[in-house]
Amino acid sequence: MKEITAMSAMKVADKIKKRELSVQEVVEAQLKAIKLREPIYNCYITITEDKAREDAIKVQRRIDNGELKDSPLAGVPVAIKDNICTEGVKTTCASKMLADYVPSYNATVVKRLEDAGAVLIGKVNLDEFAMGGTTKTSYFGETKNPWNIYHTPGGSSGGSSAAVSAEEAFVSLGSDTGGSIRQPAAYCGLVGFKPTYGTVSRYGLIPLASSLDQIGPLSRNISDCVSVLEVISGHDPMDATSVKQERFIYRQALIDDVKNMRIGVPKLYLEEDLDEDIRCCFMEAIKTFEEMGAKVELFDLDEIRYSVQAYYIISCAEACSNLARYDGVRYGYRAGDYEGLDELYKKSRGEGFGYEVKRRIMLGAYVLSSGNYESYYNKAGRIRSIISKAYEEAFNRYDVLFSPESLSTAPQLNEDSSLSKRKHHSEILNVSVNLAGLPAVSIPCGRDKNGLPIGLQIISKKFGERSIIQAAYAFEKTKPYERPQALL
Ligand code: GLN
């Protein structure tokens, strides 16, 4: 039999359903793989070994009682990004500030996964407070890319991508504020889905920028991804931005048909400083879609040109206000010795936050200060509206838009980021999607000359998940999942 941990989430769920495997067996296999590989990849901040064992017994009992018949994830071990609250389990945001924080409640997504019988196996690494694209700013050290350990797994959800790729989890949850699900998925050869803003509850997600953040799955194929989406999405009264809409059966969109699908490719995305191998793979993917009957067209979407600037102004402003709560009084780290309240604030924040977090708080405070607010924050807001409108117009003509997910494949971990060219900042390809609240996926579409994975991004209009899934599913049929060769 194929190694348990190498199976897809759907396969293992099916075997559990048919009693060919028990939940305990699956959880033990998963823990064994984690023990074997964790010393190399460092995906996890916390491994919930005891809880996973206890939960395995409980879930098996629920299955035996016939309770979980309709759940696609019953008995499947999942990893959760460590900025998503888990009751009784440390949730650190990869920061010294929250290194000992144990939430007293579950995020809605965690509750929904557990209700569906998924088994939490651990909390995975990220850039501190999800700021970054490499995991290098994590207080708990960087994560390695299972395709090549000298390269980053991407970020900020780098633990989420490496864990699924290294078969240390079947599926995982990440969060995407400006590409943090899609980019690590691309760097590790996975599917990473950022849903429409408001589709998945943010209750219990420690915020980076509340108007941009969205939780979503990372998986080895689109069917696994869709199963997780189905479980975690839907209205939640605990999140004021959660959208009231009928529950969508995402599985119904797994249709191998893109005939007459209208695909738009924004020219700007191809004019950027793209790696040649990525350009080739992207063009090949387009050809595949054309062969399958889709209609592909290049078009102008120049409005997104200033999306990165607008993104940084808005996200830093929101981060600055969200992170004001860490004052050494109520949450997290408190400095050891201080005199008076002012010094308590200064020292706790000064010692608890890392460099990148401080940099963004400063930028946020600057653009929000009187005098600057008008010229920066308001202006960024206006750019945001222009971008949203431009996308809306594009979706009158196209069902989906395609772009490469990143300008380069995973950079080396030791690369000095101050020297790294704009090339490695693929944010131009990602952040406009968050600014407009759109759904987008990254799916594997080939590898570069060094064997590193390349991602194809598919974007749709708000609540257009169905078209994305359909396109991804049809493409996956032509390009089945590839496992990292270097994996032990
Ligand atoms: N690279 C982006 C940033 O650093 C992504 C952040 C995210 O999506 N969490 O802001």
Image (cartoon, helix red, strand yellow):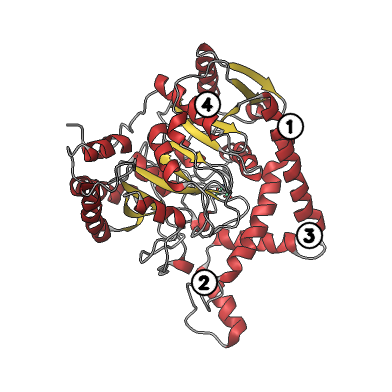
Near-viewer residue (242 or 372)? 242
Height in image: 188 above or below 263? Answer: below
Q: Kindly state the secondary structure of the residue where label 3 is placed.
A: helix
Judge whether 294 appears above or below 139 on screen: above
Q: Amino acid at mark 4?
A: Ile
Q: Between disc 3 and disc 1, whose residue precedes?
A: 1
Which comes sooner in the sequence, label 2 or label 4? 4
CA gap, disc 4 and disc 3: 39 Å
Q: Is residue 11 left or right of residue 259?
A: left
State the image coordinates of residue 243 (x, y, percent, origin top left): 58, 49
Q: Is residue 410 left or right of residue 3?
A: right
Residue identified by numbered label 4:
278
Check whether the beta carbons of the residues at disc 4 and disc 1 lie within 8 A of each other: no
- The label shown at residue 302 is 1
In whole angstroms, how far apart are the C-alphas of marks 4 and 1? 21 Å
The residue indicated by pointer 2 is 351
Report which residue position mark 3 lands on.
373
Who comes first in sequence, dot 4 or dot 3?
Answer: 4
Measure the alpha-carbon separation of dots 3 and 1: 25 Å
Which residue is at the front of the view, 212 or 333? 212
